Amino acid sequence: RQYTVASYVKDANKTIEKIRKLNKLPIIVGGTGLYLKTAVDGLSNLQIPTDKKLRQNLSKLTLIYLEE
């Protein structure tokens, strides 16, 4: 199952809200900088859906071609 930054933010927000309802201070530690920054600051493109057709087309190309 694919787990994305958007999935992480959604799960993190649910957990943070549960902790706040207990009048506790949530402390976020670990993970990658991207995940933590996104949980704290957000990203404008989180709701853009995956373009499966584009991914399929790109997966047929070689790495050398994609790097050029």
Image: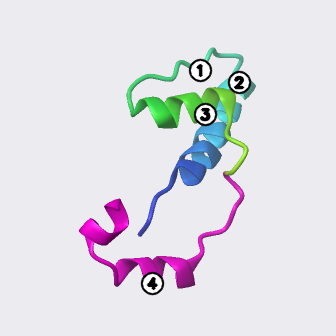
Amino acid type, mark 2: Arg
Q: Which residue is mark 4?
A: 56
Question: Does 40 sit above or below residue 9?
Answer: above
Q: Dividing the picture into quarters, in which one does residue 16 lie?
A: top right
Q: Which residue is mark 3?
A: 39
With respect to residue 26, does 58 lie above or below? below
Q: Between marks 3 and 4, how big is the CA–CA gap?
A: 29 Å
Three-letter residue code for mark 1: Pro
The mark that comes first in sequence, 3 or 4, is: 3
Badge 1 is on which residue?
A: 26
Q: Which residue is painted at 54% across and 79% down in the image? A: 54
Q: Residues within 10 Å of mark 1 (few under 14, many from 20)?
A: few
| Mark identifier at residue 20 | 2
Q: Are marks 3 and 1 in contact (CB under 8 Å)?
A: no
**Contact (CB < 8 A) between labels 2 and 4?**
no
Instruction: Give the left or right position of residue 42, taking residue 27 as reference.
Output: right
Which comes before the other along the chain, label 2 or label 3? Answer: 2
Q: Which residues are magenta?
A: 46-68
